[in-house]
Image (tube, rainbow, N blue to C red):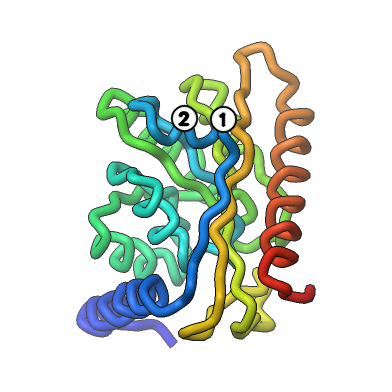
């Protein structure tokens, strides 16, 4: 069902409230490698990469890391407008497009933001999958900007994993949860793009498995 503008506004408010509610009621801990912590504490802009199915709590992970200025690449498909309105409640900006639809325009818009010193955020398997497979857009942006890619995910001991294409995870309140950051990925101008893409994909898959194990969540 397509939501009208007024319904979109109310749905975005509800979604942002839910994220904040879970941010307060789940017993979160955070795991950050030393190299990633150094990058996060610096003034260097970064590119966040997280799976579509684990996007819900990323605003909390990002804010807990002490960062504030980010633009998120968001699909032009159906749920894109709702996500864009939701993240606006956290003060985050958005750029519309994806690795498939509106890709060139989205890349131009992202590159225009570079001079603002903003962070960027991607769901490399969005907006329609395949689940857990990195598309090339995030690698291309890292190569063009020199920004490090920081994989990040979350997991929760108890929660609902939906039967959607992305296996979207909704934590239960008052359960235990973890935010896990991965090691930085740098993409040189002369890098083998496929090797960089495959390396990031492996890292993100391993990070998600690790997060699930840390809270005792079974696949």
- Asked whether 148 or 60 is in front, the reply is 60
Q: Quadrant of residue 19?
A: bottom left
Residue extending farthest to the top is 190
- Asked whether 105 or 33 is in front, the reply is 33
Q: Quadrant of residue 215?
A: bottom right
Q: Is residue 9 above or below residue 67?
A: below
Q: Measured from the top left, where is residue 203 in percent x and y?
A: 72, 43
| Residue 64 falls left or right of residue 115 | right
Quadrant including the N terminus? bottom left
- Asked whether 60 or 162 is in front, the reply is 60
Q: Measured from the top left, where is residue 194 in percent x and y?
A: 76, 30
**Mark 2 nearby-residue class (10 Å; few <14, some 14–19, many ≥20):** some
Q: Residue at x 78, y 29 (%)?
A: 195
Q: In the rendered structure, are the residues bearing label 2 and label 1 in contact, judged by CB atoms less than 8 Å apart?
A: yes
Mark 2 — residue?
Answer: 39
| Residue 156 falls left or right of residue 131 | left
Q: Residue at x 49, y 36 (%)?
A: 37
Q: Is residue 30 above or below residue 10?
A: above
**Circle 1: element type:** helix
| Residue 104 falls left or right of residue 21 | right
Residue extending farthest to the left is 6
Q: Is residue 19 above or below residue 67?
A: below
Q: Residue at x 23, y 55 (%)?
A: 91
Mark 1 — residue?
Answer: 35
């Amino acid at each position: 069902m397509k939501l009208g503008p007024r319904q979109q506004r109310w749905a975005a408010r509800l979604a942002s409230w839910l994220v904040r509610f879970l941010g307060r009621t789940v017993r979160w801990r955070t795991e950050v490698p030393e190299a990633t912590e150094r990058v996060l504490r610096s003034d260097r802009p970064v590119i966040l990469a997280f799976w579509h199915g684990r996007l819900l709590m990323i605003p909390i992970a990002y804010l807990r890391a002490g960062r504030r200025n980010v633009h998120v690449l968001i699909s032009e498909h159906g749920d894109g407008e709702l996500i864009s309105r939701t993240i606006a409640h956290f003060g985050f900006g958005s750029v519309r497009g994806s690795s498939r639809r509106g890709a060139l325009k989205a890349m131009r818009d992202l590159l225009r933001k570079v001079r603002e010193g903003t962070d960027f955020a991607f769901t490399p398997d969005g907006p329609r999958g395949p689940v857990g497979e990195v598309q090339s857009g995030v690698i291309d942006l890292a190569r063009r900007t020199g920004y490090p890619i920081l994989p990040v995910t979350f997991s929760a001991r108890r929660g609902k994993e939906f039967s959607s294409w992305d296996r979207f995870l909704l934590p239960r309140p008052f359960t235990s949860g973890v935010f896990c950051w991965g090691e930085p990925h740098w993409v040189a101008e002369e890098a083998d793009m496929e090797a960089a893409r495959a390396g990031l994909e492996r890292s993100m898959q391993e990070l998600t498995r690790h997060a699930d194990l840390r809270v005792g969540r079974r696949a």
